[in-house]
């Protein structure tokens, strides 16, 4: 979708694994602040 939210869909992991991991780590605290759980099992 956009580069400001990570929904844990895994699409970015398919297109760019390393980029997905970096985004996942950067957005983790942001997602938790909004009360949403990041699915760590995807990565």
Image (cartoon, grey):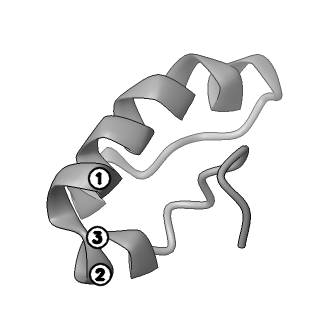
Task: Compute the Cα span from label 3 to label 2.
Answer: 6 Å
- Rendered residue at 50%/61% (across/down): 8
- For the residue labelled by badge 2, is the local secondary structure a helix, a strand or a loop? helix
In the figure, is residue 15 to the left or right of 28? Answer: left
Q: Residues within 10 Å of mark 2 (few under 14, many from 20)?
A: few
Q: Quadrant of residue 24?
A: top left
Name the spot of residue 22 as percent of width and height, x first. Answer: 31, 37
Question: Residue 2's mark?
Answer: none
Question: Residue 15's mark?
Answer: 2
Q: Residues within 10 Å of mark 1 (few under 14, many from 20)?
A: few
Q: Which residue is mark 3?
A: 13
- Rendered residue at 73%/62% (across/down): 2
Q: Residues within 10 Å of mark 3 (few under 14, many from 20)?
A: some
Q: Is residue 24 above or below residue 39?
A: above
- Rendered residue at 29%/52% (across/down): 19
Q: Which residue is mark 1?
A: 19
Dots 3, 2 in contact, CB < 8 A:
yes
Task: Compute the Cα span from label 3 to label 1.
Answer: 7 Å
Dots 3, 1 in contact, CB < 8 A:
no
Name the spot of residue 40 as percent of width and height, x first. Answer: 31, 46
- For the residue labelled by badge 3, is the local secondary structure a helix, a strand or a loop? helix
Q: Quadrant of residue 13?
A: bottom left
């Amino acid at each position: 979708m956009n580069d400001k939210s990570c929904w844990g869909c895994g699409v970015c992991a398919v297109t760019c694994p390393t980029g997905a991991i970096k985004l996942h780590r950067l957005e983790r605290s942001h997602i938790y602040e909004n009360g949403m759980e990041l699915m760590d099992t995807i990565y």
